């Protein structure tokens, strides 16, 4: 008849052998995994399409410079409006009023800079 500590030793060793067997089975499963697809092709900078020519043309005349400044102000206004719409409703009215005032001030500064009285 086995002594109490021998029973617990047998149970512990049996459990360890069972776990070791499970670990060995896991390794063989990992070897049967499906291989990964090949990586996508690398696109080097010189292979990309060039930017449109209009992006690299400098503004020469005052009218062109004014139009660019106006477009930038309108774009900034649109970003501000989008931000205001993302705020809670209780804060939207104040935000919209501030963005309108800022846009009007910026447009006035642009008109003064280019000497336009429209």
Image (cartoon, rainbow, N blue to C red):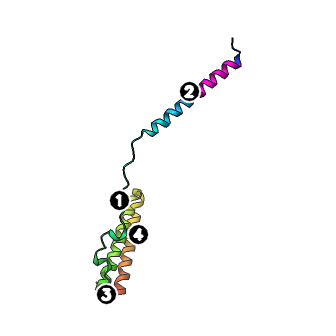
Foreground disc of the pair 2, 4: 2
- Vertical placement of residue 66 versus 48, above or below: below
Q: Residue at x 66, y 21 (%)?
A: 8
Residue positioned 42% across, 60% down in the render: 91
Residue 12 shown in magenta: yes
Q: Which residue is mark 1?
A: 41
The image quarter in which residue 50 lies: bottom left
Classify mark 2: helix, strand or loop: helix
- Where does label 4 land, which residue? 98
Q: Find disc 2 in the rendering and name its residue.
A: 18
In the figure, residue 51 lies in which quadrant?
Answer: bottom left
Residue labelled with disc 3: 60
Q: Residue at x 31, y 87 (%)?
A: 60
- Looking at the picture, how far across and down is residue 97, in whole percent? 38, 68
Residue 62 lies within the magenta run: no
Give the number of the mark in front: 1 or 4: 1
Q: Residue at x 31, y 77 (%)?
A: 55
| Residue 88 sits above or below residue 48 on the image | above
Q: How many badges with numbers are in the image?
A: 4
Q: Please tell me whether mark 4 sits on a helix, a strand or a loop.
A: helix
């Amino acid at each position: 008849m086995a002594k109490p500590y021998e029973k617990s030793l047998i149970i512990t060793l049996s459990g360890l052998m069972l776990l070791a067997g499970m670990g060995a089975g896991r390794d063989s499963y990992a070897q049967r995994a499906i291989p990964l697809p090949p990586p996508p092709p690398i696109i080097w900078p010189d292979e990309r399409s060039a930017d449109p020519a209009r992006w690299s043309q400098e503004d020469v005349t005052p009218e062109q410079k004014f139009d660019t400044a106006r477009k930038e102000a309108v774009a900034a206004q649109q970003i501000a409006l989008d931000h205001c719409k993302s705020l809670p409703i209780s804060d939207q009215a104040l935000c919209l009023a501030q963005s309108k005032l800022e846009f009007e001030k910026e447009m006035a500064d642009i008109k003064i800079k280019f000497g336009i009285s429209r």
